[in-house]
Amino acid sequence: MSDIAVLINTAVAVLAAVLLIVRFRVNPVISLILASVYLGLAVGLGVEETVKTITGGFGEIMVDVGLLIAFGVLMGSILNQSGAIRRLVEHLLKTFGPKRLPYTMGLAIGTVLQSIFLDVLLVISAPLARKLAPKIGKLGTARMATAMAIALECGIVFTVPGVASLALAGLLNVPLGKMLLFGLLLVIPTIIISIAIMTFLFRRGFWNEAKDEDHTFVAEEDSEGEEPADNGLASTPTTNSERGTTASSAQPAGASVAVVERERKEAPLLLLFAPLLTSLLLIGAGAILEIFEIQLPWLQLLGEPVIALLIGLIGTCLVTRAAIGQKKVEEAIAVGFKESGQILILTGVGGSLAATVAAAGLGDILGGFFSASTVAPLLVVWAIAAVLHIAVGSVTLSAITAAGLLAPIAPAIGLDPVLLALAAGAGSLFMVHVTSNTFWLLQSLLGQSVRGALKSVTVGVSVASVVAILLILPMSLLF
C-alpha cells in the first residue's frame, strides 16, 4: 500500500474514533476498537494480524501500567475514606489560597514530585486534584485537570528522572546534570505560562460545565471519607476566594467540643501519607540506582514500581485500619476496585489503537519524509515529534524518533544536543488525544467527559508544547 493511502486511512481511523465518541456518544471502548479494526484491515494487515495487534496492544499497556493503576487507585480510595485527602486539601487551601492552587500543584508535580513512571504519579495525585477542584471556584475542574495534564506531560519529557528526558539524554549523549538544569529552566515557565493561557480561555467561555464534566462517575467516591450532614459535628467548609482561607459556619458550643475531640483522635496527617511517600521514595531510589548503575539488589527490588506501590498499599491499609476500622477500609477497597476496572479497560483500548497505528508503519513514513529537511532544525525536530505523536500516541517514542533523525546533523551545525532533546520533548507533547492512555486516565480520574478531556488535556498540553518551543528558540541564541 502507498504511503499516501496509509496516511489517509490513519487519519480516517483517528478522526472517526473522535467523532463517534464526541458527536454520536458511542462508548469510548467500542469506538476505539472499531477504529483499530478499520485501520488494521484498511492498511492490509489482514484479519488475523489485526486482531493480534489489537489484543497485543491492550496486553502491552496492561503489562506496563495495569498493577500500577490498580494499586494507586486503591491507595487513593483508602486515603480518601480515611479523610486524609480532605484534610490535605484544607491544608493546601489555607497555605496557598484557591487562586494559586493550579499553579502550585502543577509546579510540584512537574518538578519535585516528578517520577520516572508517569502513571504512578497520576493515579496517586489525581484524587487530590479532584478534591481540590470544587474548592477553587466555578472552573475548578477545568483548571485542575489542565494543570495536572500540563505538569505530568511536561515533567516526563523535561525533568530528570522523567522517562522521556532520560531516554533523550542517553540518545543524544547529554550529561544528566546538564539535562536537569536546562529542563528545570524550561519546565517552570512552561507550566506557569500554559496554565495562565488556559485559565484565560476557560474564563472566556471555552469550558461548559454541563457538557465537559462527568459528575456521575465522581459522585460516589467524593462522598467517601466525609461526615454525614446531620451528625451535628461539623458543617461544610466554605472558602473565601479572595484570601484563600477556609471557615465553618456557626456551630453549637457542644458541637465545637465534639469537633475538637474528634480531631484530637484523628491520626496525624503525616502518618496517613507515610506509606504513599515511602512508595515514591523507593521508586526514586530505584531510578537513581539505575542512572548511576549501582548494584544493590535488595533496594532495586524495593524500588521496582509494582513492589514499591504494593508496600505502600499494605502500609496504607494497616495505618488506616487503626484509624478508621477494618470495615471502612474494606468499603474503600471495593470502591477502588470498581473505579480501577473502568480505567484499566479505557487505558487498554487506547493501547490497542496506538499499536495498530504503529503496525501500519506511519511512524517510518513520516520520519523519512521530515528527515530530508535541514531548515531550522529545532523547529523541524519539534514538527517531526508532533506529527509522530499525533499518529502513534506515545510521547517517549515520538520524542526519541524525532531526536534520532536529526542527531547526526547537530554537531555539524553547532547545535547543542540538549536543545535538540528539549525541542523533541516539546514536540512530543503536541495533541495528546485518544491514542494515549494518559488521556483516558485523566478523563476518568478527574471526572471529565471526553469532550472536556479534549479541551483540558489535548488543547492544554498542546498549548504547553507551543509555549515550550517558543522558549527553546531564544535559549538556542544564548547557549
Image: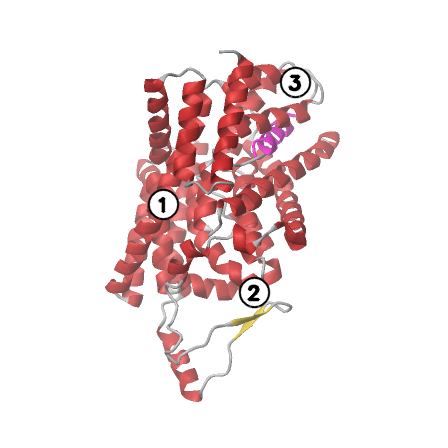
- Please name the residue that numbered disc 3 is placed on: 411
The location of residue 74, given as percent across then percent down, is 33, 52
Q: Amino acid at mark 2?
A: Thr
| Residue 304 visible in the displayed image | no
Q: Residue at x 67, y 16 (%)?
A: 373
Spatial CA distance of label 1 from label 3 is 48 Å
Q: Residue at x 51, y 41 (%)?
A: 23
**In the depicted view, which residue is nearer to us: 83 or 367?**
367
- Please name the residue that numbered disc 1 is placed on: 342
| Residue 307 visible in the displayed image | yes
- Please name the residue that numbered disc 2 is placed on: 95
Secondary structure beneath disc 3? loop
Would you say the magenta stretch is mainly helix, strand or loop?
helix
Q: Quadrant of residue 384?
A: top right
Q: Amino acid at mark 3?
A: Pro
Label located before the other in sequence (1 or 3): 1
Q: Describe residue 336's horizontal placement relative to residue 171 as left or right.
A: left
Q: Residue furthest front?
A: 24
Colour setup of the view: secondary structure
Q: Residue at x 33, y 33 (%)?
A: 63
Label located before the other in sequence (2 or 3): 2
Is residue 344 a member of the stretch shown in magenta? Answer: no
Spatial CA distance of label 2 from label 1 is 34 Å
